[in-house]
Amino acid sequence: MVSNLLNGPHGDEKKLIDLLKQGDQDAYRILVQKYQQMVFRIAFGMTLDREESLDIAQEVFLKVYQKIDTFEQKAALSTWLHRITVNQSLNWKRRWKRRFRGQHQPLESSGVPEPGTENQKPERLYQHKELGRMLQEGLRGLPEDARAVFVLKEIEGLSYGEIADTLGVKPGTVSSRLFYARKRLREQLREYVDET
Amino acid sequence: MRVKKLSRLWLLPLIIFQFTAPAFAASKIDISVKTVLAAQDAAYVDPRLKDLAKELKTVFRYTSYRLLGENRIRLELKKTGTISLPGNRVLKVTPVRISGNRAELNLAILKGNSQIFNTSIQLLNRGSITIGGPRHKNGFLLLNIFNSF
Amino acid sequence: MWMKRDHCSLELLDRYYDGEISPDESKAVADHLDGCPACRKRLGARRVVSESVRAAADEAVSRTDFSLLDQKVLDRIDAYRTPFLSKLKNIRFSWRLYVPASAIAAVLMVFFTLFLRQPADLGPSALINSLAGKISSVMIIETPESRHTILWFSEESAHTGEENAGQKT
């Protein structure tokens, strides 16, 4: 019965929440399996680190267990999870001992163009992988509030209203933070993404 | 009365723990730079480079490591120190901040008046980084930069 | 109001791209885009950034093993569940026991901290935030045991063949 909750419609969400409140182990397993990638994607957008994002995902689901009794179901479970994930990611980020991880990869002495060198051709950098690297640098530089909005919009595809609900701000604030984040990234990537 | 004594004793482990806790962040950093010439000539390792050469030999095939110079400077945060290097080069070191057990340093290598290379790193306290390698004579220059705070 | 020098403002393009404008505005922007290569290009650039961000996240997901996450979460919940206080109830507190026990614990703490501290894995000796320069290539290497960081760059005028001579394959 519990396994049906994995794919069911909204009505099943209520059943899942009821079981979560009862501390049903299978229900927590279902919760994790259903939302783990979503939680991970948001955490990754905030931290840009896979290992930390997995750790944050654990923290998020533990927080659900700790706080499920306070969840009044006025918003969707996913909205609540978004909020917890953003908060946990920000808390984690503040406790960072390292800002730079996982980039100790030797670059080949030939083949990979060094950004800013004369050999670089802008059109080559339309390839997502190269742009992705520069995007990561740009994301790192964004203020937390702008980054959270950007991640929820670009990675999760939430509407301004949904983001506003998640973060507890007005839709106008979402719009302006998103504009600011994109403006900053545009400046950072001006060399690589031709807008003119 | 008994309760008061107990509450003071509660503090004992906490007080002792504080002495083992990390000290407040330093505002000056001691930096030592060893300039090394690594080459593939006759096997030789300067005795002062024994430990460093042992590390480098796990990734490089150089057969000789010669210490060309060693400089020690003490820098305040946001102040830049300059160290002369062979081949009309200089190394500029600027500690930016200390965060936990790492210091953020900006490093720049210049040749003449032209900046060849610059990097921003977070260096572990009492740890070092080795940067190489501009060509020099029959080998390559390696700069081993150590810091403590 | 939303047109600047016969082009869409960036803010409007953002909202159009996000689907956060009224149907009338949307139609007006769509009509404008038909005849404005510059705005189309800006919109295209917006699309590239969005797709790249999503691709980076998707790639991270695809490279991550989620198979054990549910069990890890359940283990965490279990650990959280274990009532600490009920364990405490099983321990008789006596000040005669507590005083020497506390003192012994404090001494042991100092001893282990000062004398028997195992070197924790502090990570690589250096973390690289950024690098740039007149260089043709760069490698970041970490020695296997002590995790000493080596940053190797080649100046632009250097010969790459000879530079690699010193490096182990």
Image (cartoon, rainbow, N blue to C red):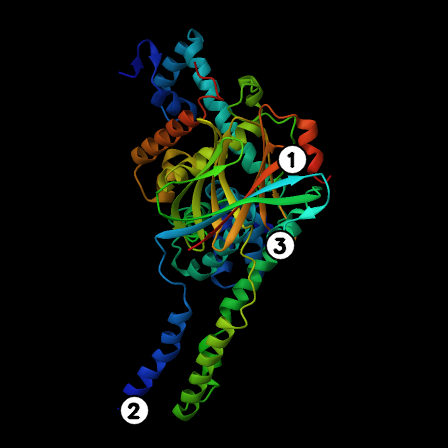
- Tell whether label 3 touches label 2 (CB within 8 Å): no
Q: What residue is pinned by disc 3? A: B51
Could you say which is closer to the camera, residue B115 or residue A168? B115
Q: What residue is pinned by disc 1? A: B139
Can you say which quadrant of the picture contains the N terminus of chain A?
bottom right
Q: Nearer the viewer, mark 2 or mark 3?
A: 3
Query: Can see residue A158?
Result: no
Q: Quadrant of residue B66?
A: top right
SS for callout 3: helix
Query: Can see residue A10?
Result: yes
Chain of residue at mark 2: B
Q: What residue is pinned by disc 2? A: B2
Residue C146 placement (x, y as % from top left): 61, 54
Chain of residue at mark 1: B
Number of residues whose C-alpha sits closer than 10 Å to that of mark 2, classed few (under 14), some (14–19) or many (20 or more): few
- Tell whether label 1 touches label 2 (CB within 8 Å): no
| Count of picture labels | 3
Left or right? Give the position of A161 relative to A130: left
Position above or below: C68 against B66:
below
Chain of residue at mark 3: B
* Distance Cα–Cα, label 1 vs label 3: 20 Å
SS for callout 1: strand
Residue B129 placement (x, y as % from top left): 54, 46
Q: Quadrant of residue A143?
A: top left
Looking at the image, tell me whether mark 2 or mark 3 is earlier in sequence order.
2
Looking at the image, tell me whether mark 1 or mark 3 is earlier in sequence order.
3
Left or right? Give the position of C121 relative to A142: right
Residue depicted at 31% across the width and 13% down the height? C3
Could you say which is closer to the camera, residue A13 or residue B40? B40
Looking at the image, tell me whether mark 2 or mark 1 is earlier in sequence order.
2
SS for callout 2: helix
